């Protein structure tokens, strides 16, 4: 994997609206479908999530680095 996407800043940072769209994906089949629809970042972020933070309980097998709270992209809460 190219290191281009491992820094979550600029195009891949929390301001990218694609993070909001990942929650709408219902299965791994939706990832290539997003790419075919021209939603590169949705597909790329979902694939990154599955590769870098696997979670088999997730619909697309990955845990995103951000959560959507009040329509804002935030880091997930930390456990104490």
Image: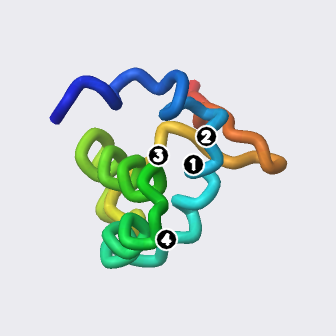
> Visible in this render: residue 57?
no
> Which residue position is annotated with label 3?
64
Marks 1/2 in contact by CB < 8 Å: the verdict is yes
**Residue at 41% from the left image edge and 48% from the top image edge:** 45
- Which residue was labeled with disc 2? 16
The quadrant the N terminus occupies is: top left
* Comparing labels 1 and 3, the label whose residue is closer to the camera: 1
Q: Earlier in the sequence, mark 2 or mark 4?
A: 2
Work out whether 78 lies above or below 46: above
Q: Secondary structure at mark 3?
A: loop
Identify which residue is drawn at 79% across, 49% down: 71
Q: Looking at the rendering, which quadrant does residue 35 occupy?
A: bottom left
Q: Residue furthest right?
A: 70
Which residue bears the numbered disc 4?
A: 25
| Crowd band around label 1 with a 10 angstrom C-alpha radius: few (<14), some (14–19), many (20+) | many
Q: Is residue 47 above or below residue 52?
A: below
Specify which label sits upstream in the sequence, 4 or 1: 1
Specify which label sits upstream in the sequence, 2 or 3: 2
Q: Is residue 2 left or right of residue 63?
A: left
């Amino acid at each position: 994997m190219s290191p281009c996407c491992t820094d979550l800043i600029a195009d891949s940072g929390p301001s990218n609206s694609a993070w909001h769209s990942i929650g709408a994906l219902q299965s791994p089949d939706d990832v290539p479908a997003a790419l075919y629809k021209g939603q590169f970042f949705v597909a790329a972020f979902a694939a990154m999530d599955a590769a870098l933070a696997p979670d088999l309980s997730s619909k697309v097998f990955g845990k995103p680095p951000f959560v959507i709270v009040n329509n804002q992209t935030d880091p997930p809460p930390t456990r104490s």
